Image (tube, grey):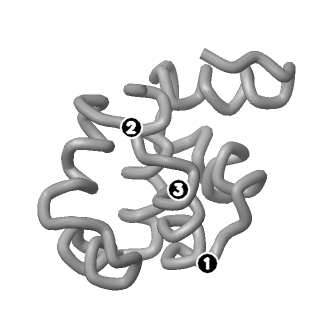
Amino acid sequence: MKRFGSLLRAWRTGKQLSQAALEEASGVGLHMVGYYERGENSPTLETFDRLCRALGVSPSQFFDGPPDFNHQTTGSNAQAAAEDHHRGIMR
């Protein structure tokens, strides 16, 4: 879950959105983006789809990370998540 959260944070900040703005744009409940980003909860597939739409990315693009993702998250678990995705590993 923390890997997903790191990717979500990278996309959100890359799009210059606050957590509240992403929650509003996606229809996600209050404070849920923060829970997802901290790895305290994981979204349903429906919620994940709404988050991707609000971010303007496809689900597969989401797991690739933003264009400068590798530079933003050097050595983080988020980079490992993107690499796992490319290998077909789900955790």
Q: Is residue 85 above or below residue 61?
A: above
Q: Of the two numbered discs 2 and 1 on the same chain, state the one appearing first in sequence.
A: 2
Q: Is residue 54 left or right of residue 89?
A: left
Give the structural element (helix, strand or loop) at label 2.
loop
Asked if the residues shown at circle 2 and circle 1 are in contact, with their CB atoms under 8 angstroms apart, the answer is no
Q: Is residue 12 above or below residue 56?
A: above
Q: Is residue 75 above or below residue 38?
A: above
Q: Is residue 14 above or below residue 68?
A: below
Q: Give the spatial CA distance, label 3 vs label 1.
A: 12 Å
Residue at 68%, 58% in the rendered image? 67
Query: In the current view of this chain or complex, which residue is farthest to the right?
Result: 87
Q: Circle 2 is placed at which residue position?
A: 42
Q: Amino acid at mark 3?
A: Phe
Closest to the observer, 83 or 88: 88
Q: Quadrant of residue 2?
A: top left
In front: mark 3 or mark 1? 3
Residue at 69%, 20% in the rendered image? 90
Closest to the observer, 70 or 20: 20
Q: Circle 3 is placed at which residue position?
A: 48
Residue at 75%, 29% in the rendered image? 85
Q: Amino acid at mark 1?
A: Gly
Quadrant including the N terminus = top left
Give the structural element (helix, strand or loop) at label 1.
loop
Q: Position of residue 52 (x, y in %)?
A: 57, 66
